Image: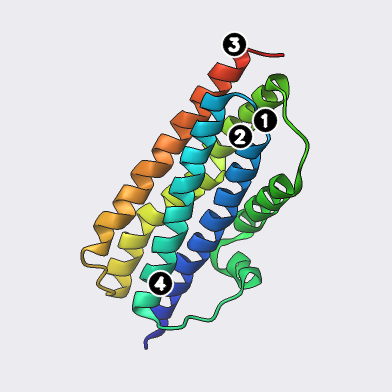
Amino acid sequence: MSKDVETIAKFLYCSGILEEKVAHAYRSLAERVDDSLVKSLLLYVSTDSSKHSIILKAISERFIKNLKIEAKDCENILGKTWRKLTMLADEEISKKERMKNVELASLADKMINFESFVGEEYLTTLHLSILPLMADKLKVDLGELKVILKWIVEDEERHEKIIAMIRNIVSKGKD
């Protein structure tokens, strides 16, 4: 196994860990809102993120069977933004109180601003867009897997639009 293949496998696996945490955070948020449309939209993003986690980890294991990497190692691989995003996701998961529309509108504003610059949707889009270039440079053949990565990027871009939609919905119906 080359060091280059190992780098790409770890990169994909850590992206999968982030997606898993984000999926749990969106699900937690969905469980705490009353509006059925908002809840459904949050679950939509959660489900997509969960699927992304599964496929990214599976792709990484295609390169390296039984890849052993711990979440704490991912900060070294994907940077400090990765750690901050996983911490924010963990904070959201730990919350249990119901969320009123006014609170959700404020959170959606923060999510939109955060995700526009360094948030999970943006980070994943950036990483998965760069990965094929990195693989080409390292002479690692991704083959048809490039198509799957492109689909995930498209989903992430859709997630940003869904968060904006949620903000608009809850802003109109603030408690």
Say what amino acid the circle numbered 2 marks. Answer: Met
Q: Earlier in the sequence, mark 1 or mark 3?
A: 1
* Distance CA(mark 2)–CA(mark 3): 17 Å
Query: Where does residue 50 sit, x and y in percent of width and height?
Result: 48, 53
Say what amino acid the circle numbered 3 marks. Answer: Lys
Q: Earlier in the sequence, mark 4 or mark 3?
A: 4
Mark 2 burial class by Cα count in 10 Å: few <14, some 14-19, many 20+: some
Mark 3 burial class by Cα count in 10 Å: few <14, some 14-19, many 20+: few
Query: Taking 143 as reference, is 121 left or right?
Result: right
Say what amino acid the circle numbered 1 marks. Answer: Leu
Residue at (50%, 32%) from the top-left corner? 40
The colour scheme applied to this rendered structure is rainbow
Residue at (51%, 39%) from the top-left corner? 43
Query: Where does residue 114 sit, x and y in percent of width and height?
Result: 60, 37
Report which residue position mark 4 lands on.
60
Report which residue position mark 2 lands on.
111
Residue at (65%, 23%) from the top-left corner? 105
